[in-house]
Image (spheres, coloured by chain):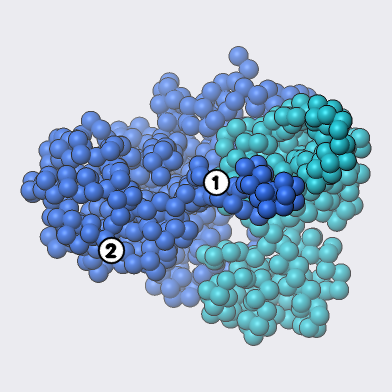
Amino acid sequence: MNPLLQFAKLLRDVGFCVSLSEIMDAIRALKLFNNPEPGTLHYRIVQACLVKRIEDHAVFNTLYNIFFDSNLVFADLVDKTEVPVKISAGGGVQSGGLSTLAKAIVSGDFAPCSIDINSAVAGVCDKPGDIHEQVRQALISLDYFGALNTLRLANLSGLIEECEYQNAVNLNSNELVRFIEQQLIKHRIALDLDWEEATAHLNWRTKNFQLLNQAEMALVKKCVQKIGKRLAVRTGIKQKPSSCGELNFSRTISSAIATGGYCINLRYSRKFPDKPELVLLCDVSNSVYQFTGFMLQLIAAFRQRFEKVQAYVFVDTLWHIPNNLLLQELGQTLVDIRENNRCSVSGLSDFGKVFNEFHKEVLPNLSAKTVLLILGDGKNNWRPLELPVFKEITRKMNKVFWLNPLPQEHWGQEDCQIEKYKPYCTDVFECSNLAQLEKVALSIL
Amino acid sequence: MINSPEQLKQLLNNQNYLVDDFISTTVYLACALEKPLLIEGPAGVGKTQLAICLARALDKELIRLQCYEGIDASKALYDWDYPRQLLRIQAGNGEGWKRASEEIFGREFLLQRPLLRSLLSSKPALLLIDELDKSGEEFESFLLELLADFQVTIPELGTVEAKVKPLVLLTSNGSRDFSDALRRRCLHLYINYPDLAREQDILTRLCTESDDAVVRESVELIQRIRKLPLHKLPSISESIDFVNALAKLKITRITPESLTGLAGIILKYPQDIKSVSEKAVALTGFVKV
């Protein structure tokens, strides 16, 4: 079989949408260059034809390197010439200066510590555990976290410039993590492990929010923003008069009556974005913290366009997020909520108490058109459910959707009471990864 | 007709547009395979300029469609010349509706917008659909037929096929995601900020009033600023403005004060300007002349 077909299948397995026409394009393009061997040119052609999103480049690079057994890294492919990095000489951080790894993270050149990296990978590749755990163990044995901490201290004491520090922790360190992951996958495949199984975790779109690494979090954040913007401009069904758009024949003919039956003024109309009235009720307890962050980000994108969107957070008491906080950087909002103990007295979720508060304080101010979106795992810590109150809330709302980041097989187990609330909701969705979030958001908002 | 990415690179170079191998290979593939090319990247990295220079380099007529929120087929593809149609109906008093209706939906009353113009052009054309992310999903779906088959369907006239297939370039700043259907019809090119050497080449080429030392110093400074977590990073066009401003003000060495004073040229958000101004000493202190 053509290796390109196998590679396309592999890309599909990790979530890429690769169509037959794209594979044919890639084959035609490779023929134009007399079917070059895997390498820089081959990589460029295949990437241009098969990868259509910048977010997918990192995973594509990893898969390309594994499948075609090459060691290309992105930096090799763009003829990159970096500004020389300045690290203050001699002084060192606290004592002893920066380690070789810390220097490599700053410069992005990992060649001086390649032996250490390879031995760290070799040391963990036969250990039990999933690939995330193996990567973590390899990083620990490299003293990666220590190096990051040293860099942070060096930045704070002014030994490393802010821009170099940001570049090191946001880009170069991710390159190292990706390289280690790539080597471990290669090893797993060499052990005759199924390709699909060995690479499944690379699909960050279907990866549980709790398992995302730093680079993947950034990608998901970017995607959530895009979904939010897409939803915010989505047009409704109703048309409104407009100075441009489609010709509105009925209005044009009506206006012609005033001019004796001659159509002098043309009338247009076009569709405008829907204006939803939306209330978001988010659990921010530890178990759903990550997911709530992404959902708040989605709603923040919405909030910039629509006035009637409100967000509340809770653990065991309800707190309304003011607009200024909702629109600022998301991480900061969540830190503010947590550090100031805005919505937690006991630290344990209490859905019943929160629904009671919502019923008393918020519900009277909402219209019957409002859509209520609840985010939470339904783990009520064996506290009263207040089902009659919840029933009353759902009766007064237009629709009530519950998004649960807990896998469906765990619903109803232990203190998860979602099954008791479910009959009163319009719908309940499992929503633990980006793919599910996108699907749910597009179908209900 | 171009025969290789190297030739294309040279042709673009002659138009003062410097590309790396990655860009030249992808653009060459779009030309050779006759596929639309979707170009994404941050604002100001030269996506639109690539299309303009490519049209000049390949001697194609540039037909540009600037997208915006609410753009529809009547602005992008065709519209009927309603006032003329009304006049035609009134002028032909008594000739009967059948004949009038046949005539008023003929090509004489068709207003060609950029998409239709690119299909009906007898000369090779380059169709630039600029900032597609500003348009809505409906418009995106409407483009699918054109991107796949280089044809459009006008209900009253039937299918209009391209006389000469235009080279289609679509640009986006990524403010909105596109559907898989649109993406799979195009080749994809992501243009990022240039590296140090390429940016230096670009600025040396375009900022003829500045000497090389100032250009090098400016590029090193801007590359450092791009590593900071800012709201909007400085683009190439802003780098060019910055170097030109230095030349106009006859500044030969970038000091913290001059950086603070000119920060508004490369940065467009108050919080970014504040952040860079606070770090001006460290940022300029690293620049060696």
Q: Which mark is residue A239?
A: 1
Q: Give the distance between the C-alpha atoms of the residues marked 2 and 1, in whole angstroms.
A: 34 Å
Q: Position of residue B129 (x, y in %)?
A: 73, 45
Q: Residue at x 25, y 69 (%)?
A: A340
Chain of residue at mark 2: A
Which of the chains is blue? A
Chain of residue at mark 1: A
- Whether residue A325 is visible here, answered yes or no, is yes
Q: Amino acid at mark 1?
A: Gln
Closer-to-camera residue (B272/B69) = B69
On-image quarter of the C terminus of chain A: top left
Instruction: Give the residue number, with chain letter if any, for mark 2.
Output: A320
- Whether residue A66 is visible here, answered yes or no, is no
Q: Residue at x 56, y 59 (%)?
A: A107
Q: Position of residue B61 (x, y in %)?
A: 88, 44
Closer-to-camera residue (A332/A171) = A332
Residue A403 placement: quadrant = top left
On-image quarter of the N terminus of chain A: top right
Classify residue A176 as left or right of residue A8.
Answer: left
In this rendering, do the residues under marks 2 and 1 share a single chain? yes
Q: Earlier in the sequence, mark 2 or mark 1?
A: 1
Q: Nearer the viewer, mark 2 or mark 1?
A: 1
Q: Residues within 10 Å of mark 1 (few under 14, many from 20)?
A: some
